[in-house]
Image: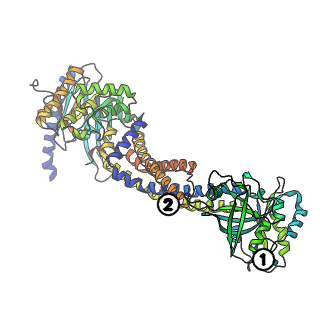
């Protein structure tokens, strides 16, 4: 009962001094707002990336050749993956290696996806055009890519053996090139590579799914993947036999250290190679690295937030002390009317907690807006973390109690005679 | 040498004091005669109040105060400023504790109570009316009257009902939802009187209740006290420096230099 009275009293007090209340809350607002904002962006990023990684198969192992670092201190998949390199034909992973690998680990392997990336290009049909990433692939590749074929079929053995000019394309591309209500199977479009023009026939259509890595605005047609037979791709770009990278899908009963075993197996072929070695990585290991990064970022934010909240809390304490001095007579009167020290203390703690909670709520709203804006700017769907919001509210309450206790206690211990005499 | 000159002076002082004592005693007897056999609401025995205790500048403000107030009395404590009447009021109101002596309020020995019990005493037994009204700002008249009941944990509905009745008693019903800063001095004091009545206290302790008011509104406020005294039988202790105001009360206790120098019934009937 006294508690509810105190709440309405505190709110009316704050309303009477709006500017002061706002300035008092500012520290809390900035502290909570920045945490929620950054956490929302971070969370949106992680959610989007995790989703797209899972859709790509988080357990898929990517075997690639990478440059040996002279000091050999390179660590983590990220650094290795983005190191620029131009390997010679003798440095590439060969079909023989893959065959031996298959012989050695047959049971653990579900599929091996081989690719030859021809790069970005433009598919043209008359006046219509759309961006494509041309990916030459083998038969098993769709076990890696997991594209949902909604019309026609994926690349088959015949296509590969005969280097057929066939393509499996996205529904988005079909709509753009051939129109929305036209069956695209059997239709053709052209690709220009170097000085040559190639004509491709659509044999299959898959559903396009936007993923976290695609940073394109929604109003233009996205660049989608176009799958062609591996042999056809090699003919186009004139690549030598062998691969810079390929993907292994482990079977359900593959051992947990399959990634390490795979890396060890292929690295063996490169022991005498002075510039290149083979490495294996998976989205899972990549995700681990990312989670670690996000964790470090969160910790840094938490420290900054803690500092700003302590500063905010000191602001609250300062204003509470001012408020108590201003209201000395009120405190004296309340004591004369029968208020116990405890009820005076409660009154001022409630007031300070309310300041902090209102500040916290404004901070959360500001943070959510910032986070949503930030996430939108980066092209992710905003996904605020409920747990962070709850923690923020509880934390601001705790600040209110912690920094409100000293002033409230000072008020509670006032001598009623002195307080009533205060001018 | 100084002894010789001082000797007769102190003798004279002692004589004067004895006379004063005799006068006081007879007056007390006269006043007490009407309430013989009753337990007093207030009984003070040898109340001494000192400040800065144990320091070189120790200052004794009250030097052994003895008096009693009985149920239904309207008593004035009158004295010039600096006479110790405010200190005495603080002790009567349980806002302060005496350095020594016994203070019995409605049968409770206040001098022996802890903080929490003192708060209860102030809440239940004493209704304060201050010179400067001391209404809680940003809280309307009704809520101000409810305040002592809130501290007495009276349920909300009952609280609000009683507060409305009390505001009616002081003819402030139409201002119930007004904030203190929307009320005139006289109106504020009427709300304060209603508030002092909230928990039906044993005594109403009014400290210069008309001090901040003009004579007309002061009259109005005094009329309310008389009404409360006559119609509701309230025990009222009025602290004032004004002899004129004191004369309105049934009994007048005069305090000077920290001592009670006289207790007498009022001279005539209030006009």
Image coordinates for residue A306, horizontal then vertical, percent: 51, 58
Viewer-nearest of labels 2 and 1? 1
Image coordinates for residue A345, horizontal then vertical, percent: 41, 43
What distance separates the C-alpha of mark 2 from that of mark 1?
47 Å
Chain to which the residue tagged by mark 1 belongs: A
Vertically, is B170 above or below B54?
above
Query: Residue A323 versus residue A150: which sits nearer the camera?
Result: A150
Find residue A307 and name its label: 2
Secondary-structure class at tag 2: helix
Chain to which the residue tagged by mark 2 belongs: A
- Name the residue at 33% across, 39% down: A334
Left or right: residue B8 versus residue A282 is: left
Q: How is this picture coloured?
A: rainbow
Image coordinates for residue B255, horizontal then vertical, percent: 19, 37
- Name the residue at 14% across, 49% down: B4
> On the image, which quarter does residue B183 sit in?
top left
Label 1 CA crowd tier, 10 Å (few <14, some 14–19, many 20+):
many
Image coordinates for residue B238, horizontal then vertical, percent: 21, 32
Vertically, is A35 above or below A262?
above
> On the image, which quarter does residue B98 sit in?
top left
Can the viewer see residue B63 in this picture? no
Secondary-structure class at tag 1: strand
Residue assigned mark 1: A276
Query: Residue B211 versus residue B24: which sits nearer the camera?
Result: B211
User: Of callouts 2 and 1, which one flags the residue occurring earlier in the amino acid sequence?
Assistant: 1
Can the viewer see residue A91 in this picture? yes
Q: Are marks 2 and 1 on the same chain?
A: yes
Find residue A38 and name its label: none
Left or right: residue B240 versus residue A252 is: left
Give the residue furthest to the right: A103
Left or right: residue A341 versus residue A180 is: left
């Amino acid at each position: 009962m006294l508690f509810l009275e105190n709440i309405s009293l505190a709110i009316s007090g704050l309303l009477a001094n709006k500017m002061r209340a706002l300035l008092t809350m500012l520290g809390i607002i900035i502290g909570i707002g920045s945490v929620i904002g950054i956490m929302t962006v971070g969370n949106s990023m992680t959610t989007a990336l995790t989703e797209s990684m899972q859709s790509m198969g988080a357990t898929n192992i990517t075997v690639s050749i990478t440059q040996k670092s002279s000091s050999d201190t390179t660590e983590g998949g990220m650094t290795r993956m983005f190191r620029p390199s131009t390997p010679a034909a003798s440095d590439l992973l060969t079909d023989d290696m893959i065959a031996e690998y298959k012989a050695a680990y047959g049971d653990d392997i579900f599929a091996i996806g081989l690719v030859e990336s021809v790069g970005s290009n433009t598919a043209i049909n008359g006046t219509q055009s759309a961006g494509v990433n041309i990916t030459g692939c083998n038969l098993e590749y769709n076990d890696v890519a997991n594209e949902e074929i909604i019309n026609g079929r994926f690349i088959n053995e015949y296509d590969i053996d005969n280097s057929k000019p066939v393509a499996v394309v996205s529904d988005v591309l079909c709509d753009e090139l051939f129109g929305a209500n036209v069956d695209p199977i059997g239709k053709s479009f052209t690709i220009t590579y170097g000085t040559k023009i190639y004509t491709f026939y659509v044999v299959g259509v898959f559903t396009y799914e936007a993923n976290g890595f695609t940073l394109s605005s929604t109003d233009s047609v996205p660049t989608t993947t176009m799958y062609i037979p591996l042999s056809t791709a090699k003919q186009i770009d004139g690549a030598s036999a062998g691969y810079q990278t390929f993907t292994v899908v482990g079977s359900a009963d593959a051992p947990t250290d399959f990634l390490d075993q795979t890396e060890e197996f292929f690295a063996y072929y490169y022991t005498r190679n002075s510039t290149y070695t083979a490495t294996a990585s998976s989205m899972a290991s990549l995700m681990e690295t990312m989670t670690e990064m996000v964790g470090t970022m969160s910790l840094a934010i938490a420290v900054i937030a803690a500092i700003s909240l302590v500063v905010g809390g000191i602001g609250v304490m300062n204003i509470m002390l001012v408020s108590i001095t201003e209201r000395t007579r009120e405190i004296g009167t309340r004591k004369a009317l029968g208020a116990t020290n405890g009820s005076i203390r409660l009154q001022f703690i409630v007031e300070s907690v309310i300041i902090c909670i209102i500040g916290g709520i404004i901070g959360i709203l500001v943070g959510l807006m910032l986070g949503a804006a930030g996430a939108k700017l980066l092209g992710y769907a905003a996904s605020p973390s409920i747990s962070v919001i709850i923690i923020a509210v509880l934390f601001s309450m705790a600040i209110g109690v912690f920094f409100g206790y000293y002033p409230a206690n000072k008020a509670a211990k006032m001598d009623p005679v002195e307080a009533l005499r205060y001018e | 040498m100084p002894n010789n000159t001082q000797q007769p002076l102190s003798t004279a002082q002692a004589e004067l004091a004895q006379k004063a004592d005799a006068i006081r005693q007879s007056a007390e007897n006269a006043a007490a005669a009407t309430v013989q056999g009753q337990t007093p609401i207030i009984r003070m025995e040898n109340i001494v109040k000192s400040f800065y205790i144990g320091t070189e500048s120790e200052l004794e403000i009250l030097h052994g105060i003895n008096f009693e107030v009985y149920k239904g009395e309207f008593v004035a404590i009158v004295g010039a400023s600096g006479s110790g009447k405010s200190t005495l009021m603080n002790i009567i109101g349980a806002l302060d504790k005496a350095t020594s002596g016994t203070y019995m309020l409605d049968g409770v020995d206040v001098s022996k109570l802890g903080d929490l019990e003192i708060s209860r005493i102030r809440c239940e037994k004493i209704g304060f009316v201050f010179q400067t009204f001391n209404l809680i700002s940003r809280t309307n008249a009704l809520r101000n009257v409810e305040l002592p009941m809130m501290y007495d944990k009276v349920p909300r509905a009952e609280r609000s009902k009683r507060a409305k009745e009390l505001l009616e008693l002081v003819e402030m019903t139409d201002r119930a939802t007004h904030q203190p800063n929307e009320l005139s001095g006289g109106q504020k004091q009427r709300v304060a009187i209603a508030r002092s009545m909230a928990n039906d206290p044993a005594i109403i302790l009014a400290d210069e209740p008309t001090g901040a008011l003009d004579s007309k509104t002061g009259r109005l406020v005094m009329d309310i006290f008389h009404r409360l005294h006559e119609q509701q039988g309230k025990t009222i202790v009025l602290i004032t420096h004004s002899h004129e105001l004191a004369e309105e009360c049934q009994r007048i206790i005069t305090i000077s230099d920290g001592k009670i120098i006289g207790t007498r019934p009022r001279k005539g009937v209030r006009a």
